[in-house]
Image: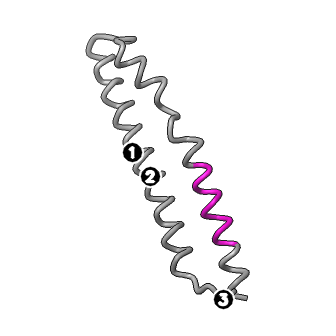
Amino acid sequence: MANVDREAMRAVAERIQRLSDEHWWALDPSCRLMENDAWVGPTGARFDAQVHADQRELRDMLTQAVHSAKQELASLPDRS
């Protein structure tokens, strides 16, 4: 039964990695636009700071999710 759990966790870890890869660049277009002064003034500066902070937070969460899934998989016994 442990092998079934390990295979299920492997599938979960792979899915998390795919989702991370898919969403890693989600905020890049907005960040690039802001770096090219797409929106200026105080409101633009606030949005620029927020979108870059959101990008860092998203990437931190994705990194943590992948890391946690890999740790969980590594902690399961391999009973092949």
**Looking at this view, is 40 or 75 the one in front?**
75
Residue at image point 28% right, 11% down: 41
**Residue 16 at x, y percent in the picture:** 59, 56
Q: Earlier in the sequence, mark 3 or mark 1?
A: 1
Check the picture and name the quadrant holding the C terminus: bottom right
Between the residue at mark 3 and the residue at mark 1, the CA separation in whole angstroms equals 37 Å
Vertical arrangement, residue 20 with respect to residue 30, above or below: below
Kindly state the secondary structure of the residue where label 2 is placed.
helix
**Residue 67 at x, y percent in the picture:** 46, 63
**Residue 44 at x, y percent in the picture:** 33, 16
Q: Residues within 10 Å of mark 1 (few under 14, many from 20)?
A: few
Residue beneath label 2, please?
61
- Select label 2 or label 3 by which is in front: 3
Q: Earlier in the sequence, mark 2 or mark 3?
A: 2
Residue beneath label 3, please?
79
Residue farthest toward the front in the current orientation of the protein:
80
Three-letter code for the amino acid on which mark 2 is drawn:
Met
**Left or right: where 16 falls relative to 37:** right
Residue at image point 73% right, 88% down: 1
Residue beneath label 1, please?
57
Between the residue at mark 2 and the residue at mark 3, the CA separation in whole angstroms equals 31 Å
- Select label 3 or label 1 by which is in front: 3
Three-letter code for the amino acid on which mark 3 is drawn:
Arg
Kindly state the secondary structure of the residue where label 3 is placed.
loop
Q: Magenta stretch?
A: 8-19
Q: Residues within 10 Å of mark 2 (few under 14, many from 20)?
A: few
**Looking at this view, is 11 or 47 the one in front?**
11
Vertical arrangement, residue 50 with respect to residue 19, above or below: above
